[in-house]
Image (cartoon, rainbow, N blue to C red):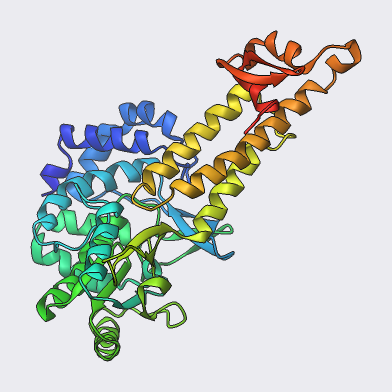
Amino acid sequence: MIGQIITRANLNAAYLQVVRNKGAAGVDGLRVDELQAHLQANGATYVQQLREGRYQVAPIRGMEIPKSNGKKRLLGIPTVVDRVFQQAVARVLQPVFEAGFQAHSYGFRPGRNAHQAVGQSLLNINEGYQDIVDIDLKSFFDKVEHYLLLELIYKRVKCPMALKLIRSFLRAPILIDGQLRKRRKGVPQGSPLSPLLSNILLNELDKELEKRGHRYVRYADDFSIYVRSKAAAKRVGNSIYCFLRDRLKLPINREKSGIRRPTAFALLGYGFVPTYRKGERGRYQLIVETSRWKSLKAKLKAITRKTTPASLDERLERIGQTMRGWINYFKLASIHQKIKTLDHWLRNRLRYCIWSRFIGRRNPIRRGEALSDWASKQEWLTLGAAPAWVAGEWRKVPFCARLLHWKD
């Protein structure tokens, strides 16, 4: 297998993937834009070391990022060279293990995505499986036992050099606050190999659920089980808790885990509410979690803050990028009415930005100039003509001038 990992085609594809993903530098300070020149100078040496089992994995750089709940998540950032070789390993291992993964695992797999996971969850609920065992794994990526993971990999991978390389990636020390710390547990979040390794371990949970005939949905370490009664949910929850504790050595976050009804359950940012349509009793539809709306509004508020140094064109471009990504992700939910309300709020924010520029340092009011006349002379405002109420009559004015003279 090590021969497949170090082929020129595989390494080139891995390099291109690392460049596309960008990302921060590791402990050696080498940036992604410097990677090509570095590999041209040292690539042959690295390949020879990999072939002979002499490659030395560098420590990973620990970096904390804020979570939505106010806490922090520790990321492990490998060097860009190690990221290339991790990506090369992942490209070879993925087809080997993909055939054994279960149908209702949707995270970090080719041809699968979060929309499919949410759609399957909604299907389960609408077919009457409305008592949900929602299990949150406590610090999953920090608690994975290396020996369990390596045993599962060894069942499919017999190449000693490949196994040694994977073990080196798992055991690489982490640099936190200037100190190197040993790692005997955990898969570092931030490495190209960690999504595949997490799926390899949690596939054992999937197989157990399949064997018992349960309906479930798993996206990475986020999984839920769907049953028809609260009693069944309690029984299943207790048995799965024991399986995770005894077989996979994974602790459960009891505060976040529990038995939920659909209206109290959320999955990957989506919530569930009754449809309230005639003849559809017991059916549910998707909505967006309140926290996700607040997060979107906070981003838009930062873009349209009048003190943000940006032109109108720059603001509109950033708003478009933000909204396109958000709507593409939440397109399965019922969001039409809320988007209309958000649009009115956003227009008001943009009016205020334009008005602030209008009465800024070069104040047209001091020259006795009407706002609509001033706006019609500004190329940066001319985004199309629209009817607007100006000086007691309807006129065709530039679109952004219409924002300042809106008449519903």
Which residue is most to the right?
366
Q: Which of 63 and 322 is in front in this view?
A: 322
Residue 307 is left or right of residue 218, and the answer is right
Which residue is most to the top?
377
246 vs 386: above or below: below
Residue 387 is left or right of residue 188, and the answer is right
What residue do we see at 8% from left, 57% from top? Answer: 99
The answer to whether residue 274 of the structure is visible from this angle is yes
Image quarter in which the C terminus is found = top right
The answer to whether residue 149 of the structure is visible from this angle is no
Q: Which of 150 and 114 is in front in this view?
A: 114
Residue 151 is left or right of residue 221, and the answer is left
What residue do we see at 25% from left, 83% from top? Answer: 240
Q: Nearer the viewer, residue 128 or 186?
A: 128
**Residue 41 position in % (x across, y down):** 33, 27
**Residue 295 position in % (x across, y down):** 55, 52
Image quadrant in which you'd find residue 161: bottom left
Callout count = 0
**Residue 402 position in % (x across, y down):** 64, 23
What residue do we see at 40% from left, 79% from top? Answer: 257
